Image (cartoon, rainbow, N blue to C red):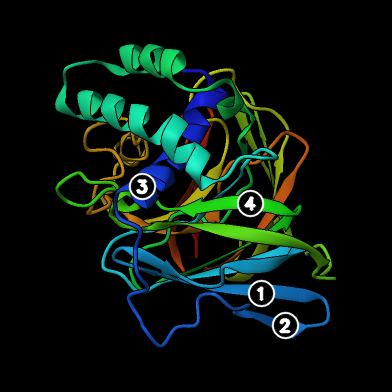
Amino acid sequence: MISRRLSCAIGIVLAAISLAACQPTDPDPSADTGSRQATEVSSDVYVVEILARDYAFVGPAEISSGWTTFRLTNEGTEHHFLFLSLLPDGKMFDDYVAEVALPFDSVWHELRDGTIDKPEAGAMLGRLLPEWFGSVKPMGGPGLVAAGGVAQTSVELEPGVYVMECYVKTPDGEFHGMLGMARPLTVTSDASGALEPQADIEITLSNYDLRIRGDMTAGEHTVAVHFQEHPNYGLGNDVHLVRLEDGTDTEQVVRWMDWMNVDGLRAPGPAQFVGGTHEMPVGYTAYFTVNLAPGRYAWIAESTAEGMVREFTIE
């Protein structure tokens, strides 16, 4: 099977492919994406506003380090997310493109076209990717959010060069990242000074359990996600919140969340996602904000292991 470290970083490769193949231009010429488009909501909160469009991120190229709240507004017509990854010291996009993007692009096309299966794809990537690829550090970010929605997630960032990307698929099976929805982000040594958020709901992710503490009631909540463990294979542990309509099959949603399936993460989504957080290293904590209206919901971890789906209802 594909190793966890390899699998969780696979999506990041799409960013390099995108940058190598079609360095995107800003879809809104009036947007000053090279400046600090971050809003100090208060002295305790540092908010970075990101617009998700079909298919580009609009936002700053440089932000401060420390506790950072990413507010992702989905202005597109498909689901999007923002996955953050820290590149190892000394590595830049040129290295990523030359040593990772081209071999991965070849392997991905074979997998998508059905000439190899998942285990064969993992073996090929293991042979082709450089050793430093395993040092890419997943650092969370706003989870899946439906068109017209807003996802807000807070993470503590150290200085460095990051990739921010979305690798949801279009209806015809192309990754958003390959179409331009990937870009670099520099985090400077200047600290934001923001404080760690306070949560009223806590989720602890371990192998293989999703433990929840707190009262899930109608209204706004801040959810803390503690990364206690990761499995040795698969995508690792993250958590997304999905609103379920009558008749929605959670197993179908789980299958859709596996991007390595041909139809996985392929628009349109089987249900309405409302946010969450991506994988982070063991010992880290991310926070995200949700506003729960009456209805049926489920917490779903992308590793899709036993015990990683929790349904609940808001009256």
* Crowding at mark 2 (Cα within 10 Å: few <14, some 14-19, many 20+): few
Q: Amino acid at mark 4?
A: Val
Which residue is painted at 22% across and 30% down in the image?
A: 109
Q: Amino acid at mark 1?
A: Val
Question: Where's residue 20, x and y in %?
Answer: 36, 47
Which is more N-terminal, label 3 or label 2? 3
Q: Are marks 2 and 3 in contact (CB under 8 Å)?
A: no
Give the labeled residue for mark 3.
20
Question: Where's residue 154, x and y in %?
Answer: 67, 61
Q: Secondary structure at mark 1?
A: strand
Which is more N-terminal, label 2 or label 4? 2
Residues 107 and 302: in front is 107
Q: Amino acid at mark 3?
A: Ala
Q: Tell me the distance, in whole angstroms, between the alpha carbons under discs 4 and 3.
A: 17 Å
Given this view, does label 4 or label 1 mark the residue nearer the observer? 4
Given this view, does label 4 or label 2 mark the residue nearer the observer? 4
129 w.r.t. 80: above or below:
above
Q: Are marks 4 and 3 in contact (CB under 8 Å)?
A: no
Give the labeled residue for mark 1.
47
Rendered image quadrant of residue 133? top right
Question: Where's residue 126, x and y in %?
Answer: 46, 15
12 w.r.t. 114: above or below:
below
Number of disc labels: 4
Which is more N-terminal, label 3 or label 4? 3
Q: Are marks 1 and 2 in contact (CB under 8 Å)?
A: yes
